[in-house]
Amino acid sequence: MNAGLIEQLRILEREGADQIKAAASTSELEQLRVELLGRKGRLTGVLRQLGTMPADGRPAVGAEANRVKQALAELLESRLGSLAAPVTAEPTLDLTLPGRRPWRGALHPVTRVVDEICAIFRDLGFTRVAGPEAETTWYNFTALNTPLDHPAADVHDTFYLAEDLVLRTHTSPVQARIMEAHRPPIRIVVPGMAYRRDSWDASHAPAFDQIEGLAVDEGITFVDFKATLAEFARRFFGSDTRTRFRPSFFPFTEPSAEVDVSCQICGGKGCSACKGTGWMEIMGAGIVDPAVFENVGYDPERYTGFAFGMGPARIAMQRYRIPDIRLLYESDVRFLEQFAGQG
Amino acid sequence: MNVSYRWLQAIAPTITEPPHELAHRLAMLGAPVDEVRELGAGIRGVVIARVEEVRPHPNADRLRLCTVDAGTGQALQVVCGAPNVTAGGLYPFAPVGATLPGGFEIREAKLRGEISQGMLCSARELGLGRDHMGLMTLSNGWEPGTSFVEALELDDARLLVDVTANRPDLLCHLGVAREVAPGGIDDLRLPSFPAGGGAELGIEVHGEEGATAGVRVILEDARGCPRYLGAVIRGIRVGPSPEWLAARLRAVGLRPINNVVDATNYVLFELNQPLHAFDLDKLGDQVRIRRARPGERLRTLDGLERTLEPQMLVIADTERPVALAGVMGGEESEVTEETRAVFLECALFDPLTVRKAARSVALSTDSSYRFERGIDPGGQPRALRRVVDLILAVAGGEIADRGVDLYPRRVGELRIALRPTRIEQVLGISLSVDEVIRQLHRIGFEMDASGAPLRVRVPGYRPDVTREIDLIEEIARRVGYDQFPEELLPFRPSAVPEDARVALAARLREWFRGLGFLEARTVGFAPRDDHRVPLLNPLSAEESHLRDSLAAGLLRRVEHNWAHGTRDVRLFEIGTVFLPAAPHEVLQEEIRVAAAFTGLRRPPHWSDAGRDERWDLWDLKGLLEELAAELALEAQLVPESALLEAITAPETRLGIRLAEGWLGGGGQVAATAVDAPAWAAPVFVLEARLPVRAAISAAPEYRPIPEYPGTERDLALVTPVGVPAAEVAETIRAHAGALLEALCPFDVYEGAGLSAGERSVAWRLRFRAPDRTLTDAEVDAAVERVLQALLEKHGVRRR
């Protein structure tokens, strides 16, 4: 089929001409000569197919091949002439000039913290799960032993979507949902957003990240609880990190604790970041209240467990020395690009 | 809760550690101290002085010359501008060399030509209050020259204790002392009052009605008020409190008002029992505890006229309400300097009733705060006696009658069974019964019997303790959380599988990061739009609804970056959107991924020689194609989209389709949808939902790598307007036969040599047979079939 070969020759001519015009150096031109017209070049490649076609069509193809070869050779010569004009035509190869790089991508600083926390808990046997952000008041409050009219519900100033539907004020409702859907042993972490009616300022946002954790089985005790969270703290903050558990109050844990770690900035000596205490509060936690087990149909005499919740945004702010929470949600490229590295 | 260190010591003299150590111990007991404020710290050298004589200043109308006895044996001349300075009065005096808070040092000065050898001080100048209308007046009885700080016990520390909602017992000094005294309750005593020690108030218990000193007290609503005590004191002299009492109140941040009101506040802060004193003469002869009547009004002590609602509990005289029960008293029956007799109220109000009333009048008072959290239902008689003692000591007068105690239904004591085995099951350590009893006794829990289980009596001031687990928490707390060992025990693997969406989200984040995108986080709110779910109680109009798209939020972030001069933006986000749902449900949630990008495709490079490499629609389409493959194997990309219709230009829309509906889409942002500066490059957006179940991709199966060479054919096809490339490709595939291995367009040309509306699309076809080298004849035959079909179906001819 001479039409096919002639078409190929014309495409070769067009492409070859483009390449020759775009070439920026004599060495590039020399390379093109070999690629296009050389013994193993494209033109030869086309002509090799001559053998497979009927003899009567060959002269036409041959003539076209000659024409293309000559045209490209002329173009090469003239291009070579114009490039060779200055004697030092070869551009200086200056390897100190910057290379051509792609944009650097980055995960959000809070994501980095969330991922690291979840990875540590994964090593400790916790699987990652999720739950809805629009939550019923049952799961958000009642199932968690928080009557709606108790002052404890005061600390959650809550966004309502309907009479019995809220934007969850913490990730804890997922505890109840998971317990209803599964039997122990349960070991989960729940990263997600939570919402409170706080106006924007340097340390408050109406929406914020939280990570919930829950372990339920037979035989889990306060000793276990302390050990697991202290182990997490050492893995996350460094092996010499000390942990402090203080009594506190959450309606859905009993006993409840605030967990502090030795200040990451001063190492526990006391500085402005830790207000001189040497400690930084990182999470609220406790032994699961038997009332929560009753609400989800578990036997509180058989199962015990512990739960914890922490704010990765706050931890990210401490870790990366971010002074204002609003920076986390502004999505300023100049801010986000700072988190492109792996450190 | 503000706690005075000296006050604590007065109740528990065994407390000897310095305030900062005490603060630490409180923290470890569950009541962190936000701040320890040293009081009187900035005052140095200030003494109590008597003004002997007051004369006009010869050169100034508003200033006066005082002769001051500061105990030095030498009369000093002091210029004073305060209107209330009187001869014979005792005032704090800062002599030359003394220092006031803020580091202000007193020097001898000449004021309008007259020497002033020191300064008579107001409370504000001493850092003791905001009152700077006049000098701080001290009661008689102090020797001039006495140290002011020592006399007023100002060398105190205020601990700002952060009390959790479950611990109302810590809202008073007795409760805090109980927690921290080394011997617990055995160390506590209520200090006696200077000049006190009068007759003890007798109290008579009644049902729903009783009388004291001619005042009939009627309890109409025993649900809102389970217990109501009253007593009358006559013959009092209302005036400023003695310094010791004023100092106690100042130390906890209260402003002294008068001796009667101060006495009620003192007992409130000592015993956690709110009290109220009514001016008896304004009250008449009847006190009725009832619900408010529709339209009733009350001017409360803060001077505001309030309309009451029928669910509010009030204290009323024969006609009108005189107080909003447990929240605030009325102005009309307020104790004033003219008051000669008071009716003292000491009640137990229902937490919910008080909470609702306080909420609806938007007030939170020291009283309502405590009632809401629950006070000791048995604490009223002691508190009433205590306040009567104190009033007699500081305001004089005498008890008019036995007090009345309306207590129709006694609240029984709570007893809880406590099993040592359960303690061990929860806490993981074993404690001896003696240790358990000792720890609980210190904070007032007593045992009925020490068999197993233990029977534990719960003191009334601990309404939070109602169950065995609450006692176990108390034990853990008293033992000290730091005393527990930390031992990592073996665990069984979680029965809960990982949520596929969490893993998919993590994978997509890495994917976008690898492509050079920056992860954004925006919050889930958006301005009003009819397609969005509204918040019932939004914070602002810009955040009044829930977002129904991530890309729309990212566009606002692109604008933010433009506004800061950043031209090259590439953001992505994974987050939740909220869509209105069927009538019986409020909304439906979806986790989505979205991206928005504009500007240069990669950072500018010196070799670009000024040629801009901007993102274009083909970048968007490529991303969508790849994303579709990440999300769902069977997804198809089509040149239309039901997503992002509000923000994309219609002719640029691309959608990811599944058999059951739209999975995602994208396009170039319409000029009207974004506030772009003149220099801005086009913006592209995409958005897709994360499938509930991740794409189950079959494990790849190995196919043999071809052994025989393939043959390529390039076809330049003149394609009439209206014939899309996808249809041409489809026809090529359909007619090229099984030997066609790959097909792709490699050039598109419009212009010279073609008629208007035509374009030339060059396609490369690769043919290959798995078992032999193809002959040209086979390939040519296939190409011929293709060309034939193209011409017939689409009018496409070879160029």
Image (cartoon, rainbow, N blue to C red):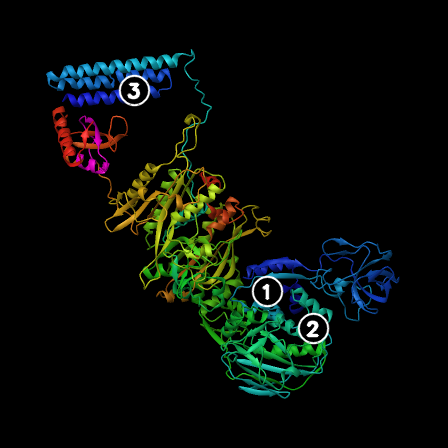
Q: Which residue is mark 2?
A: B258
Q: Position of residue B217 (x, y in %)?
A: 58, 85
User: Circle 2 sits in a helix, a strand or a loop, which is it?
Assistant: loop
Q: Amino acid at mark 2?
A: Asn
Disc 1 marks a residue whose amino acid type is Met
Q: Say which element carries label 1.
A: loop
Q: Earlier in the sequence, mark 2 or mark 1?
A: 1
Mark 3 vs mark 1, foreground winner is 3
Residue behind mark 3: A17
The residue range painted magenta reads B703-732
Q: Is residue B652 visible?
A: yes
Position of residue A175 measured from the top left corner of the image (x, y, whole percent): 39, 59
Residue B348 drawn in magenta: no
Location of the C terminus of chain B by quadrant is top left
User: Do discs 3 and 1 share a chain?
Assistant: no
User: In this figure, which residue is indicated by the disc labeled 1?
Assistant: B1
Gap between marks 2 and 1, in whole Å? 22 Å
In front of the other: label 2 or label 1? 2
Image location (x, y in percent) of residue B89? 81, 69
